[in-house]
Image (cartoon, helix red, strand yellow):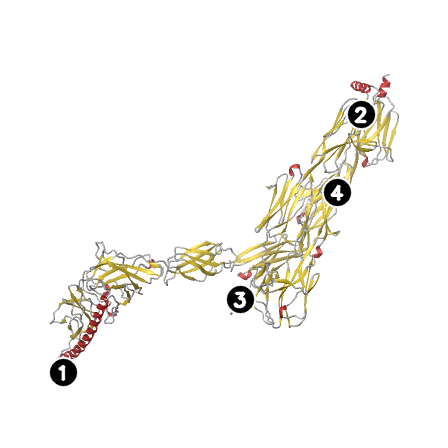
Amino acid sequence: MLKILLLLLSLISMLRSGLSYRSDLPKVQKIFFPDQVITGQRTSATCTAVSGTPPMEFKWLKNGHSIKQNQQFTIRTSADYSILFIENVDLSTSGNYTCELSNSAGTDLYTALLEVKEPPKWIKEPKDAYFSAGDNISIECIASGFPVPNVTWMKSYPAGKDNMQDVLSQEKAPGKSILKKKHVNIEDAGFYLCIADNGIANIRTNGIIIAISGALLYSYESSILDVGSVQKISESILFLYGISLCSLYSRKTDHFHFHLYGWTAILLLWLNASPINMESPKIQPFNLATYFRTGEKVTLLCAIKSGTPPFQFTWMKNSQKITKDDFTDVLQLKDISTLSLPSLTLTSRGNYTCHVTNNYGSDSHTELLNVVVPPNWKSLPKDQETIVGEDIAIECLAEGYPTPIINWKIQEQDNLKELSLEQKSPQIEKKGGILKINNVNEDNEGNYVCEASNGIGDGISHTSRVVRFCFIMWTIFNICLGQNRSPGYPRIQPFYFPEKLTEGQKAKALCSAVDGIGPFKFHWYKNDQPLVSSSHLTIQNLEDYSVLVINSLQTDHAGNYSCTVISSLGRDSYSSQLVINVPPSLIQEPDDHTLEEGNTAIFSCRATGFPIPIVTWARDEGNKEMLDHERMNSYPNGTLVISDVKKSDEGMYSCSVSNNIGQDLHKLVSLNVIVPARFEEKFTMKNVRRGETATLKCEAVGDKPLSITWTKDKAEIDFKKHTRLEKFDRDVEKGLSSELIIRTSDRKDGALYGCLAKNEYGSDERNIKLLVVEVPAQPLDVKVKEVWSRTSSIMWSAPYSGNSPITKYIIQYWRDRGGPHRLLEDIIPSSQTTVLLKNLQPGTPYAVTVLGENEIGQGQPSDILKFITGEEEPSGPPTDVWIEAKSSSSILVTWKPPPRELWNGELRGYFVGYKVDGSSHPYSFKTVDNAANDSQEYTLTNLMKSTKYNIVVKAYNSAGTGPPSQDLVAKTLDGDVPEAPAFTVVAASESKISLRWGDPPSRNIPVTGYTLHYKKDGGEWYHIPIIASSSKNRFTITGLESSTPYKIYITASNQYGNGEPSDITTVTTSMKGFVIGNSETYVDLSVIVPVAACILAFIVVTIVVIIYYRKSKARNNLERALQGGKPFPYTGSTQRYIDIDKTRLPAEPGTLTSSYATIPADQITEEGTREMKAFMHGNMKDRPLPSKPSSMKKKNKGHVYDTAQ
C-alpha cells in the first residue's frame, strides 16, 4: 500500500536560474558641427566614448574614406575622446564625417554632415562709367558664394524721395544682375550700388558713379561711417560698410558738399578695416545623449569655436563649481577643457555648465546629464508548491530609475500570454509586484512569468512555477521529507572530472543512482543547459547510472556539468566542474608602430588559454617589467596603450604571455616616434625699450635636419639689407634654437615676427609680437574747454602711448606775467583727458602744458596753452591814501593801487568818494582812470571853504568795484595860499647869485613871506625864509662854490600855508679868479649885466602883464560859471602839483620817500561833465617843499599821518 502511495506522489519541480553574459560594446556619443560654418573659419567635432571596455580605438572618415592628418586636418585623441580640427575650411571641406569607435567587443559609429557656406565675393565688379545722353547702358555685376547670392542694383535719389530704391531696369540671374537702360538721359546720372547677399555673415557692396554729359549729380553732405555700419545720410544716400565721401568746399553756402559736374570723376574711398583680433570667447555647443546608465563613463568636452586666447575654463553642476576629486576629473588644454565622470551614479544627474572667459568677455553652455538605472531584481520570485484550496502569494520586486513597471504573464504551451484577471479565476489579484492566488485549484497550476521594465534596456523577466498536490499526497510527502528521505528516494553518488585535463584528451563522468526505487531517468546539463549526444559528446543511460563521455576535449567543453536523476518518488542532482588546461596562444599579435609625437600608440597582444593567460608588457631594457605610468596603461586583455607618445618612448617593447601551462610566449615590437617640426609655444609678446637691443628666441622641437626661417609681418627677413638684425642658430637636445637680435631698436621695429620651423615630417610657425616701448608722445589738441574766475577746464586728446599704458597725466601750469613764477602741478589718472584747475587767481594770465607718463618715464610736454581767468571785483582797497587841503575849495588825494594779488584782473580806474563830515548823505564819487605808474592822485575841487570832508578811495575793474579805503578827514583852508612870484637872476659871480622877483600874480591874496630854495647838483636843499616887503624884492645867495650849477626856486606863503612853487631855474657860478673891471666896457659884466637885466625886465614885465590879464579873466569866468552851476574848463595857465612829502625836511631826493607819480585824470562833476586836471612839469618831480604839519586825519581815530601811508 505504501508503494502505491509513493508512486502517486508528484515530483517537486525545481527551477534553475541561468546566467547570461553581455559583451561591453563601445558606444559613441552624438557628434555634430556648428549650424553655420563659413569659409576661412576653423571648426571642430568631438567624438566621445559613452561606454565600452578599453582599450578603444578612434577613427575618422570623410565620405567613407579615412582622414589623414595634414595642415588642414588635425586629430587629437585620448583614451575617452577624439577631436577633429579642420583649419581654414572651404567649400571642398563639406561632406559626411564619421567617427568610428572600436574595441575587442565590436564597433560603433556616428556620422554628421558638415556644410560649409561662403559669403559673397565678386567675380565681376562694376566700374564708374561715363555716357552721353541717348546712349544705351549695360553693366554686369556678378558674385559667387554658397548659397548662391542674390544680386541687386540700387540707385540713390535726392532728399524727399526714398534715398535708396531698387533699379527696375535690371536683368537678374542666380549670382548675377545686369543694369540695363536704353536711351539714358540726365536723370539717370547718379550713384548706383550693386549689392550681393546670400544671408551669410555680411553683404558685399560695390558703388559706382554713372555720369551723363551735362548732368549735375546731387549734393551730399560729407559723412564718414564706422566700418560695418549702415546709415541713411540726410541728403540722400545709403552708405554701406564704411564708405567715406571726399568733401569739396562750397564758398556760397560755407558748407562742405560733394558735387559732380559733367563727367568729373569723384573718387570713393572704401575702408578696408582690419581690426585687431580682440574677440570674446564662443563655445562650440556640446550635446549629451538622452540618458546614461549608472556605471558608465561620460566625458564632457568644451571646445572654443572662436575667441582670443588665453582662456579660463570653469565647470559647474547645478550652478555650483566642480572641483577635481575621486568622482570627477577636470583637464584643461589651450583651447579645450574636459570633464570626466568615471562611474555615473544617480547623484551624477544635473545641469552641467562650461563657463569660459578671456580678457574680452565670456560665454557658457549648459547641458542636462540624465542618469538612468535599468531594472534589476530586488526580490526574485520563487516557485510555489501548494495544495488545493490554499492561498499563495508570489512576490516579484524590481528596482531601477525610472521605477520599473511589473507585468505578469502565464505560459501556455510554448507561448507567453498576458495574465488576464477576467480569464483566470477571480481569486487572482495583482497588487504592485505581488501576485496573489486565493483558493488554489487545478487551473492555477503552471509557469508564471514576472516582467520588469522601465524603458531602459530590454527589461528583465523571471519564471515561477506553481505546483499543486492533493492534500493526502502532500501530507505523505512532507512526512517522508521529515524522515530524512525513505530508501525509495533517488540519490546520486558524487562524481568528479580528472584534474589537469588538456585539449585532445578524453573525459568521462559517471552519474550513478546509489539509492532509490527505479525506474530512473537521467538528464545531463552543462551550465544549466541540457545536453544531448553529438559527435564530440556521448551520453549512455543504463538502468541505474548514466555515463557522459567527451571524446576529444576542446576549450569550449570546460564548464559546470550537472546530472539529474528522476524517479516516481523524487529527484536528485549533482554537479561537477570540468576544467581544461590550455597552454597560451596569441590570437592577436602586436605590430610595430611608427607614429607622430603626440598620438596614441595601441599594441594588442591578445592571448587565449586556460587558466586565462597573464599578459605583461615591458621595455626591452634589461627585460624589466614595465612600471605604471600615467601615459602608459596595460589592460588585462593584453593591450598596451601609450597616450601622447613622446620621443623618449621610442624603442622596443616586449609582450610576455604565461598561464603556467606549457611554454610562455614572448613577442618583441618596436615603437618609432617621429617628431614633426613644432613649437611648444605658438605666440608670445615681448617688450623692449626704444634704443635697447631686443632678443627674440624661437626653440623648435623636431627630428633633424631642422631649419628655422624668420619673418617680419609675414615677409621673410633679408639679413643682408637689415644690418641691425642678426640671426644665431644652435642645436639643442630636442631640436633647434634660433635667436633674432635687433640692435638699437626703434619704433618701426615694432611688428609681428614669425619663425617658421621645417623638417621632413612637417612645419610649424610661432609668432612673437614685439612692442617697442617708449615714453608717451605729446598730448594733442590741448585746449581750454571753459574758464571761470578761479577755475578752468582743460581738455586734450590722448597721445601715442609708446606701447606702454599711460599711467597718469601731469598738468603743469603757472602765472604768465613775463617773469619767473612758481610751477604748479596736477596729477590725474590716465582714464581722464580733462582736468579742472582750481584755486586760480582771477583776471590772471596763465600758461599750461600737459604731459603723459608711463612706466618708461615722462613724455614730451604739449605745446604751451595760454588763457586768462575771468575777473572778479578787487578784493582789497587802495593803499597809502594821503589827503591834503590845497586851498579853500580843493583837497589833493593821493594813493597807491591795492597789492597786485588783490586786483583780480586789470584795474580800469578808481572811484574817489567824498562827503561833508557828519553828513547823512551818501558819498559823491569822482572817476579816475588808472595810471601806468605806481602812484595815483586826484584833486577834489569846488569844495566849501573851511569845511571838513570824509574821503574814501575804491578801485574797480571790469567785474566790479572793490572795498573802499579807510575814510580820512581833511578840512579845506580858511583862505587861499598865494602863488609863487616869477624871479630872475640879476647877477652871478664865483660865490654869489643875485635874484629879484615881482609881486605874486594874485594881488588879492595876502603874502606874508617868501622862501628861497636852492641846492647844487647832488647836494641838499637849503631854504632861506624872507619876509615879504613891498620895497625889497631881491636877495643875494652867498657862500657858493665857483663853477657850480645850482637849482633855485621860490615859494610864497601866508597865514594859510605855502603856495605852489615856481619853476626851477639852474644857474652856474663863474670861474674862480675872474676879476671884474679889467676888461673893455663892452665886455665888462658890470655894464652888460645891468643893461641885459633892464631889457629882460621889460620883456618879463610885458609877459607877466599879459599872462596876468588872461589868467584873471579866466578865473573870473570860472567863478561865475561855478556860481551858476555850469562847468568851465581851465584854458589858461596850468596848475602844478608836486609829488613829494611836504612835511619832511629838505634832503636829497635819494633819501626821501618814493615820489607819487602825477597822472592825467578827468574830473567828473555831479552833472557828469568832465574838467581837465593839469600836470606837474617834469623838472619839478624831485623838488621838496618846506616842512609844514599836515591837517590829514582819520575819522574817529587818534592817529596823525605826516607822510603817505
**Of the residues shown, which amino acid type is indicated by label 4?**
Ser
Contact flag, marks 1 and 2 (Cβ < 8 Å): no
Q: Is residue 743 above or below residue 1033?
A: above
- Image position of 293 (left or right of 1025): right
The mark lying in front, picked from 3 and 4, is: 3
Q: Is residue 943 visible?
A: yes
Callout 3: few (<14), some (14-19), or many (20+) C-alpha neighbours within 10 Å?
some
Sequence-wise first label, 2 or 3: 3
Contact flag, marks 1 and 4 (Cβ < 8 Å): no
Q: Image quadrant of residue 238?
A: bottom right
The mark lying in front, picked from 1 and 3, is: 3
Q: Is residue 991 visible?
A: no
Q: Quadrant of the C terminus?
A: bottom left
Q: CA distance from mark 4 to mark 2?
A: 45 Å
Q: Which residue is mark 2?
A: 467
Sequence-wise first label, 1 or 2: 2
The mark lying in front, picked from 4 and 2, is: 2
Q: Residue 761, position in %: x, y?
A: 69, 55
Q: Which residue is mark 4?
A: 104
Q: Secondary structure at mark 1?
A: helix
Q: Is residue 916 above or below residue 255?
A: above
Q: Nearer the viewer, residue 802 or 1202?
A: 1202
Sequence-wise first label, 1 or 3: 3
**Of the residues shown, which amino acid type is indicated by label 2?**
Val
Q: CA distance from mark 2 to mark 3?
A: 109 Å
Q: Which residue is mark 3?
A: 256
Q: Secondary structure at mark 2?
A: strand
Q: CA distance from mark 1 to mark 2?
A: 193 Å
Q: Which residue is mark 1?
A: 1081
